[in-house]
Image: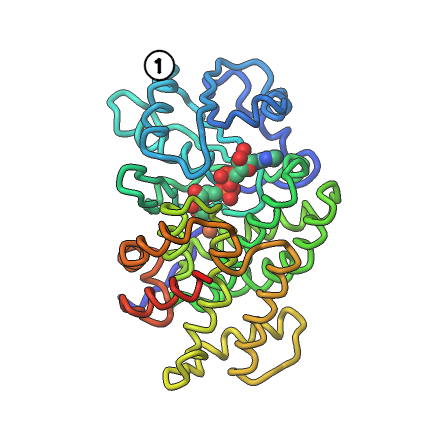
C-alpha cells in the first residue's frame, strides 16, 4: 500500500417512481438486452423496453441462476451481430453478471466501439448494478470465480422497486440476506474505511428493518423501495471495502451444492462472525474485530454490549432473522445430500481459500479453519 486510499463511484444511479423513464435516452440506439426466461414470460421485459421506445434491439434471454462460461459464450454469439451501442441488463445478479461478462468479451473483439452498460436489477440482493464484480461458474470444475475489473462497472444503474414486487418470499429472503452479508463483511474487512462504513450503517439499518416486511408482504411498496436502496448501497460499500471469508466459502459451497447465493451466505454468517471474533476458540478472541461487530449490534438497536457480548449478540440476531425468514441453519436442515457435501469438504475448503473475496477477511484463515466451519455447517 502506498498510503493513498480512494473511494470511487462510477455508476450513475437513477431512483424514484419514474426512474425507468431514463431509458428513453437510448431511443434510436442499437440495444442488446440480456435477461432471463422469467423476465420475458412474465411480461416484465416488455414493461421495461416500453420506456425506450423505438430502437434496434436483440434479446438474449438465456441467463440461468449462477451463470456459466457457456452461457456467456452463447450470449456473445447472439449479441455480437448487432454491434450494440448499449448493453441493457434486466434481471437478478445472475443476469447483471452475465451482461458484464458478455460486454467485456465483446470489447476484446476488433471493431467494437465503447458500449454503455445499463443495469436494471430485479432482485434486491447482489448490488451488482454498482460493483466491479461478476461471478461466473465453471460447471466442469464445479467452481464459481468472481471476476473483478473496473471495466465491469455499469455506467448506469436504474433502481425501479416496482420490478422487485414479483419476487417470491423465499427469493426475497435469500437475496435480502445477501445484502446483510455484504454489509457485515464490508464493515469488518481489512479494507473497511469511513466512506464504506457510512454506506453500510445505513444499508444495514434499512435491510434489517424492511427485509422482514418485504418477506411478509411482497407488494409493500415502501419495503421494496427501501430494500432496493439498501442493496445498492451495500454494493457500493463492498465494491470498495471488499467482502470476506463468508463469501469465499459461499462461492465454493454454492458451486458444489447449488444452493442460492444469498441463502448459503445467510447460513454461514453467524458461524463466520463467531470465527472472526474468535468466540468459539476462546484463545483466539480478537477484541478489535469483536468490537466492530458490537458496533453494528448497537446500530441495529441492540443493547450497547462490550465487544465480546456485542459480537455474540450480532450472531444471535442473524440466527433469529434467518429463522424468521425460513432459512435453514445447517446443510442437513436444508435437505442437501450430506454424502456429497461430506466428500466435497476438502475441495470446497481449498476453493474458499483461493477465492479473491477471502483475501479481505479480518482473520487469516487456514485450511483447518475453513474445514472446521464447513463441518459446523453440516448438521
Ligand atoms: N456481481 C456482484 O457484485 C455479485 C455480488 C453478490 C452475488 N453475485 C452473484 O449473483 C448471483 C445471484 O443473483 P441473485 O441473488 O440476484 O439471484 P438470480 O439472479 O440468480 O435470480 C434468482 C431467481 O430469481 C428470479 N427473479 C429475478 N428477478 C425476479 C423478479 N422480479 N420476480 C420474480 N423472480 C425473479 C430469477 O429468474 C431466478 O430464477 C450469484 O451468481 C452470485 O454469486 C454477484
Ligand atoms: Fe453476495
- Tell me how the rendering is colored: rainbow
Quadrant of residue 357 within the rendered picture? bottom left
Report x, y in % for residue 201. 58, 64
Q: Nearer the viewer, residue 254 or 25?
A: 254
Q: Nearer the viewer, residue 41 or 233?
A: 41
Give the residue number, with chain letter if any, for mark 1. Answer: 81
The extreme front residue here reads 339
Quadrant of residue 109 within the rendered picture? top left
Quarter occupied by the N terminus: bottom left
Residue drawn at 58 percent across, 45 percent down: 124
Q: Nearer the viewer, residue 76 or 280?
A: 280
Report x, y in % for residue 44. 62, 26
Residue drawn at 38 percent across, 64 percent down: 375
Left/right of residue 319 with respect to residue 241 in the rendered view = right
Badge 1: residue crowd in 10 Å (few <14, some 14–19, many ≥20): few
Residue drawn at 58 percent across, 27 percent down: 23
Q: With respect to residue 79, does 321 lie above or below?
A: below
Report x, y in % for residue 97. 42, 38
User: How many numbered badges does the structure rendering display?
Assistant: 1
Report x, y in % for residue 119. 50, 35
Amino acid at each position: 500500500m502506498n498510503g493513498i486510499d480512494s473511494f470511487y463511484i462510477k455508476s450513475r444511479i437513477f431512483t424514484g417512481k419514474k426512474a425507468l423513464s431514463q431509458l428513453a435516452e437510448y431511443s434510436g440506439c442499437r440495444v442488446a438486452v440480456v435477461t432471463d426466461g422469467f423476465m420475458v414470460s412474465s411480461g416484465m421485459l416488455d414493461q421495461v423496453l416500453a420506456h425506450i421506445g423505438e430502437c434496434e434491439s436483440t434479446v438474449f434471454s438465456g441467463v440461468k441462476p449462477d451463470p456459466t462460461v457457456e452461457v456467456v459464450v452463447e450470449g456473445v454469439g447472439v449479441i455480437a451481430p448487432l454491434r450494440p451501442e448499449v448493453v441493457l441488463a434486466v434481471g437478478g445478479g445472475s443476469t447483471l453478471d452475465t451482461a458484464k461478462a458478455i460486454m467485456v468479451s465483446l470489447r476484446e473483439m476488433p471493431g467494437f466501439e465503447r458500449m454503455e452498460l445499463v443495469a436494471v436489477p430485479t432482485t434486491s440482493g447482489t448490488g451488482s448494478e454498482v460493483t466491479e464484480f461478476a461471478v461466473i461458474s465453471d460447471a466442469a470444475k464445479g467452481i464459481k470465480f468472481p471476476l473483478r475489473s473496473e471495466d465491469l462497472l455499469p455506467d448506469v444503474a436504474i433502481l425501479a422497486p416496482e420490478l422487485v414486487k414479483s419476487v417470491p418470499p423465499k427469493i426475497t429472503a435469500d437475496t435480502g440476506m445477501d445484502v446483510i452479508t455484504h454489509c457485515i463483511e464490508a464493515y469488518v474487512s481489512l479494507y473497511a474505511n469511513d466512506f464504506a462504513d457510512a454506506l453500510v450503517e445505513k444499508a444495514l439499518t434499512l435491510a434489517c428493518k424492511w427485509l422482514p416486511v418485504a418477506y411478509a408482504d411482497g407488494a409493500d411498496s415502501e419495503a421494496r423501495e427501501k430494500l432496493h436502496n439498501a442493496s445498492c448501497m451495500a454494493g457500493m460499500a463492498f465494491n470498495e471495502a471488499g467482502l470476506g471469508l463468508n463469501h469465499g466459502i459461499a462461492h465454493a459451497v454454492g458451486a458444489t451444492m447449488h444452493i442460492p447465493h444469498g441463502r448459503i451466505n445467510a447460513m454461514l454468517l453467524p458461524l463466520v462472525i463467531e470465527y472472526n471474533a474468535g468466540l468459539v476458540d476462546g484463545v483466539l478472541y480478537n477484541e478489535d474485530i469483536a468490537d466492530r461487530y458490537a458496533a453494528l449490534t448497537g446500530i441495529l438497536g441492540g443493547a450497547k454490549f462490550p465487544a465480546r457480548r456485542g459480537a455474540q449478540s450480532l450472531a444471535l440476531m442473524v440466527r433469529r432473522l434467518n429463522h424468521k425468514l425460513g432459512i435453514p441453519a445447517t446443510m442437513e436442515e436444508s435437505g442437501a445430500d450430506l454424502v456429497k457435501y461430506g466428500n466435497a469438504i476438502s475441495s470446497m475448503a481449498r476453493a474458499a481459500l483461493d477465492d479473491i473475496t477471502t483475501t479481505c477477511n479480518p482473520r487469516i484463515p487456514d485450511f483447518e479453519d475453513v474445514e472446521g466451519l464447513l463441518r459446523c455447517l453440516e448438521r
